[in-house]
Image (cartoon, grey):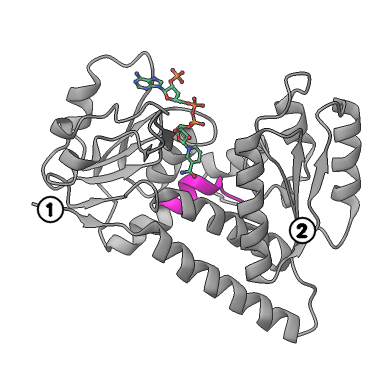
Amino acid sequence: MTAKILDGKAIALELREKIAQKISDEVAKGKARPGLAVILVGADPASQVYVRNKKIACEKAGFNDVSLELPAETTQEELLAKIDELNAREDVHGIIVQLPVPKHINSEAIIERIDPKKDVDGFHPYNMGRLATRTLNLAPCTPHGVMTMLAKTGIQLRGLNAVVVGASNIVGVPMALELLNARATVTVCHSATQDLAQKVSEADLVVVGVGIPEMVKGAWIKPGAIVIDVGINRLDDGRLVGDVEYDIAKDKASWITPVPGGVGPMTIATLLENTVQAAYD
Ligand code: NDP
């Protein structure tokens, strides 16, 4: 079997076009454009690329970009004060702080200061709690983007055996909650999990987000499984690869996400989707 490709780039483009249309409809009714503030502290090169991509996506969709670039020496108090200002502004509907922040700043304190109604990354404990209690508000972008992709397969998730490899706050845990809410039977694996190969080999659906190139071997994949690879790793030779051994996995899976062009574009599109929700719902 050769897997069908879950084309994140195409699905994200479709979602972004829908978002742009929604904005132009709302603006025609006299509403303001959604305002998104992306805060970057310091000049981490990878973060600068992510922020630039988010800004381009925002502009294309017709957002009002109110992003801020702050020097690396910005203190925690100064950053908290900026967030307070943005929380109070009516023209700002979404606020995200690009992570990681410099070491002298406590990222939890920053995330918790963002008004949960403007927390379009979905990282605030309030929004995580809403996800955990099946009363979704603003969902963490990467896992929610994966759910949008999964819907495109037309496959019912209810009753599937799902294995999530990775248990971080931004990928694995909210991913497991999303799948649990869809009534899959979910196993969450992490660095202390024993016999990972066995667990993955029983999965009808496997979502991997660990940050280790090709750690999940193609041979582990159950024939016909859906494989979602969240990982993005740059190798020394410059290639980008995921956390799954793609070339072998694609011959066993029914559906698979490529890297790049899989989950990555969905994360940004879902951020825009969340900001539109924060602005108009
Ligand atoms: P973290 O480093 O925060 O978390 C990694 C997780 O993997 C942890 O839960 C860790 O376990 C687990 N892990 C580590 N080693 C193993 C192992 N040997 N076996 C099983 N589990 C293991 O990473 P993130 O969640 O932030 O990111 C994961 C990957 O996803 C990265 O490649 C990142 O670049 C990518 N990413 C992609 C996004 C996209 O838009 N496509 C968005 C966000 C991230 P433990 O909890 O026990 O430490």
Q: Residue at x 56, y 48 (%)?
A: 139
Q: Residue at x 40, y 65 (%)?
A: 10
Q: Earlier in the sequence, mark 1 or mark 2?
A: 1
Residue at the front extreme of this rendering: 237
Left or right: where does residue 54 sit relative to residue 30?
Answer: left
Dividing the picture into quarters, in which one does residue 167 lie? top left
Label 2: which residue? 93
Label 1: which residue? 2
Q: Quadrant of ligand 1?
A: top left
Depth check: give the residue in front, 259 or 23.
259
Q: Residue at x 87, y 61 (%)?
A: 90
* Mark 2 C-beta closer than 8 Å to ligand 1: no
Our reading of the magenta stretch's main secondary structure is helix
Give, as a single range, the part of the protein colored magenta: 138-146
Residue 213 on image: x %, y %: 35, 29
- Report whether residue 277 is seen: no
Left or right: where does residue 80 sit relative to residue 155?
Answer: right
